[in-house]
Amino acid sequence: MTAMSLDETRDFLDREFPQLNDGVRAYHLEAVGPLTARMRLDHHERFLRPGGTVSGPAMMALADFALYAAILANLGPVALAVTTSLSFNFLRKPGTDGLIAVCTLLKVGRRLAVGEVRITTKGGGDLVCHATGTYSIPPR
C-alpha cells in the first residue's frame, strides 16, 4: 500500500509545482507503488541541447521529480521534503522520443529517504542515465 494513490500524488504535484508543466505538459507521473514511482518526460524542443539530444539538466529534473513523487506516494503529502544530494551517471546519448524514469526507494527513514532512478528512452532499450538521491524529510 502507498500513503497516496496515483491520482492523489498527481493532484498534489500539479497543485504544488505548476511551474514544471508551464506552457506544455511534459512530465507525466504514470505509476506509484510501494517504494516506487514511474514518470515520463515527453519529447519537447525546450529539453534539447545542441546536437538534438535531451539535455543533462532535463534528465536531472526528471530524476529529481520521480524521486520526489515516490517519496510523496509512500509518505503522504510532505511538501517540505527537500533534496539533500543527487548523483548522476550519464551513460548513453538518449534518443528524441522521450524518457522514462523508474525510481526505487532504497531506504525510507524518519529523517531521510534514499532512492535510485533509472532513466531509459521511452521506446525501451538501454539505460541512458542512473541517478541516486537523498531527501530530507521534515518532522511531522
Image (tube, rainbow, N blue to C red):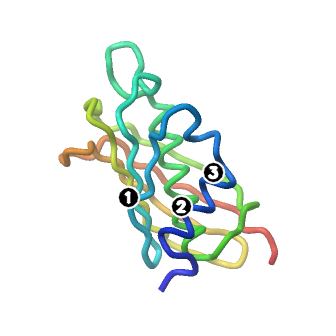
Q: Are marks 3 and 1 in contact (CB under 8 Å)?
A: no
* Figure quadrant of the C terminus: bottom right
Q: Which residue is mark 3?
A: 85
The amino acid at mark 1 is: Val
Q: Earlier in the sequence, mark 3 or mark 1?
A: 3
Q: Earlier in the sequence, mark 1 or mark 2?
A: 2
80 relative to 85 in the view: left or right = right
- Place of residue 14 in the rendered image (x, y in percent of width and height, measured from the top left): 60, 53
Identify the amino acid type marked 2: Arg
Q: Is residue 127 above or below residue 54?
A: below
Q: CB under 8 Å between callouts 1 and 2?
A: no
Please name the residue shown 27% across and 46% down the image.
Answer: 127
Tell me the SS state at disc 1: strand
Identify which residue is drawn at 44% across, 27% down: 47
Crowding at label 3, few (<14), some or many (≥20) Cα neighbours within 10 Å? few
Q: Which residue is mark 1?
A: 102
